[in-house]
Image (spheres, rainbow, N blue to C red):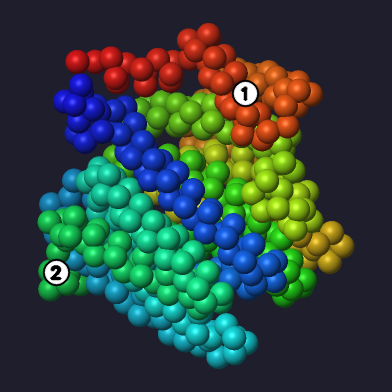
């Protein structure tokens, strides 16, 4: 039994098993991490109130935005080139590391400038968060090396270490001192310890800067430009709502908005993890259109299998979920939360399709698409936030993400010469989700406990999948049945 578990979760064997192994490790890490991080955010929200909670999220988002050019697609580009089996991997890794350091140094200057424009009470915590981002962004390069070598168990343990320390220390320090600075210190300590761990684990894959190559430096910088804009716009798209709500409404609006946004961010770790797990394979087979199409179709099916029940369940139970977690103090955020839940489903597929475009060297197209959606989201925010507040911001996000999905589907269809991306199985998951939510709706007539209702929905959906002999359930079962 121990050997079987080792083969499934520690060794790299078949493509399906590697994807399952990596996804399982990162998913497990993120579930544990998100539970602790969510507990921290709930504690912060209850301790500091909507306004203090809004300020905390504002500087977290703002500091991250200042460092958004610390990667600008570098790790994805190096990961893609790493999979090409080039003979100059040492030069590639060393040159990428040099660029990473230079980018972080440049973004540090942006962070320092930003400090000058902040209110006095936010300057110190913002400075600490910036220092954390310096460490965090350097750490991401080592995480990329683990991912490129299909060792995402290292990434997972790194994430668990960071989140446990951050959450535990965050609760203790905020409880003791009751301010945002103590929260920032907890984040910094967690990031430092996690960085040491991942560096030790990936040391064998690293290369000194002395091996950096000028020609490789020029090549990477030129190829990074479209990657850079695409990644930056993607990050900015998730941050712009927070910044605009702060400017147009204030800290309290940010607090209400993020009460729901934190929960939807937890949901979105699923497509993000799955996307990062399949990206090395998509990059590896980008010239094999038949293999790539199969991977894309199966990925869409898997994301539909997971995304549809979350979409319907979240909308039905959204009010109970939000109030149970945050208390009635945050009831003003219920409608916003339900809209944000609806906006998560497009991203379940966007992560897959966008990775296909990036892996097949369509970075410039990704930039054009991201730019269009970024501007669209800002326009909708300017129109909707003054009239509808945070619900307007959430609606703009929903419209923008849906439009992004439609555009990506259009171009991916052209990439595969109009071959069908969606199979009948996708419709099956939609219908099963509707059946599931009907059962949960009936369950509400007899039960009020939100955990019980979620359990009823999950169990009924799983029974339905087993009944129709879903191939992905069978596939997972086969991993454990093999000797």
Which residue is under mark 2?
208
Residue 187 occupies which quadrant of the picture? bottom left
Above or below, 301 relative to 323:
above
Secondary structure type for disc 1 = helix
**Residue 325, label in figure:** none
Q: Does any portion of residue 463 appear in the rendered image?
A: yes
**Residue 456, label in figure:** 1
Instruction: Please identify the quadrant where the C terminus is shown.
Output: top left
Closer to the observer: label 2 or label 1?
A: 1
Give the image location of residue 373, x and y in percent.
64, 55
Instruction: Please identify the quadrant where the N terminus is shown.
Output: top left
Name the residue located 74 percent from the left edge and 43 percent from the top edge.
Answer: 319
Name the residue located 48 percent from the left edge and 41 percent from the top edge.
Answer: 270
Furthest toward the front, the residue is 176
Mark 1 nearby-residue class (10 Å; few <14, some 14–19, many ≥20): some
Give the image location of residue 304, x and y in percent.
56, 29
Q: In the image, is 211 to the left or to the right of 123?
A: left
Give the image location of residue 415, x and y in percent.
48, 37
Q: In the image, is 187 to the left or to the right of 418?
A: left
Name the residue located 26 percent from the left edge and 49 percent from the top edge.
Answer: 154
Mark 2 in CB contact with mark 1 (< 8 angstroms): no
């Amino acid at each position: 039994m121990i050997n079987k578990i080792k083969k499934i979760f520690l060794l790299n064997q078949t493509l399906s098993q590697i994807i399952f192994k990596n996804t399982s490790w990162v998913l497990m890490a993120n579930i544990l991490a998100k539970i602790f991080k969510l507990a921290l955010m709930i504690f912060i929200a209850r301790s500091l109130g909507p306004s203090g909670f809004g300020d905390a999220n504002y500087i977290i988002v703002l500091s991250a935005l200042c460092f958004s050019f610390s990667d600008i697609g570098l790790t994805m580009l190096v990961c893609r080139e790493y999979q090409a089996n080039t003979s100059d991997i040492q030069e590639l890794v060393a040159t990428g590391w040099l660029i990473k350091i230079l980018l972080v140094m440049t973004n540090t200057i942006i962070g320092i400038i930003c400090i000058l424009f902040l209110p006095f009470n936010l300057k110190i915590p913002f400075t600490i968060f910036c220092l954390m981002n310096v460490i965090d962004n350097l750490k991401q390069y080592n995480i990329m090396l683990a991912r490129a070598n299909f060792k995402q168990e290292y990434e997972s343990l790194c994430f668990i270490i960071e989140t446990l320390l951050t959450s535990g220390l965050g609760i203790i320090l905020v409880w003791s001192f009751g301010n945002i600075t103590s929260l920032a210190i907890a984040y910094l300590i967690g990031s430092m310890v996690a960085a040491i761990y991942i560096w030790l684990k990936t040391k064998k894959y690293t290369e000194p800067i002395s091996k950096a190559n000028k020609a490789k430096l020029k090549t990477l910088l030129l190829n990074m430009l479209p990657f850079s804009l695409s990644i930056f716009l993607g990050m900015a798209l998730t941050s712009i709502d927070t910044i605009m709500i702060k400017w147009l409404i204030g800290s309290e609006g940010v607090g209400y908005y993020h009460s729901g946004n934190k929960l939807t961010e937890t949901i979105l770790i699923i497509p993000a993890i799955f996307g990062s797990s399949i990206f090395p394979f998509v990059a590896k087979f980008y010239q094999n259109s038949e293999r790539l199409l199969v991977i894309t179709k199966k990925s869409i099916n898997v994301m539909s299998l997971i995304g549809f029940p979350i979409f319907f369940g979240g909308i039905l139970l959204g009010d109970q979920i939000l109030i149970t977690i945050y208390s009635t103090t945050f009831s003003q955020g219920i409608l916003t939360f339900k809209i944000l839940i609806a906006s998560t489903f497009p991203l379940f597929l966007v992560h897959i399709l966008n990775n296909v475009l990036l892996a097949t060297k369509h970075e410039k197209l990704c930039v054009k698409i991201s730019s269009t959606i970024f501007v669209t989201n800002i326009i909708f925010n300017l129109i909707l936030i003054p009239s509808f507040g945070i619900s307007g911001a959430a609606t703009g996000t929903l419209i923008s993400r849906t439009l992004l999905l439609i555009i990506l589907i259009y171009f991916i269809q052209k990439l595969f010469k109009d071959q069908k991306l969606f199979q009948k199985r996708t419709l099956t998951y939609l219908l099963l989700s509707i059946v599931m939510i009907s059962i949960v709706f009936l369950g509400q007539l007899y039960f009020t406990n939100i955990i019980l209702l979620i359990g009823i929905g999950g169990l009924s959906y799983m029974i339905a999948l087993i009944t129709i002999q879903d191939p992905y359930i069978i596939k997972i079962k086969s991993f454990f049945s093999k000797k």
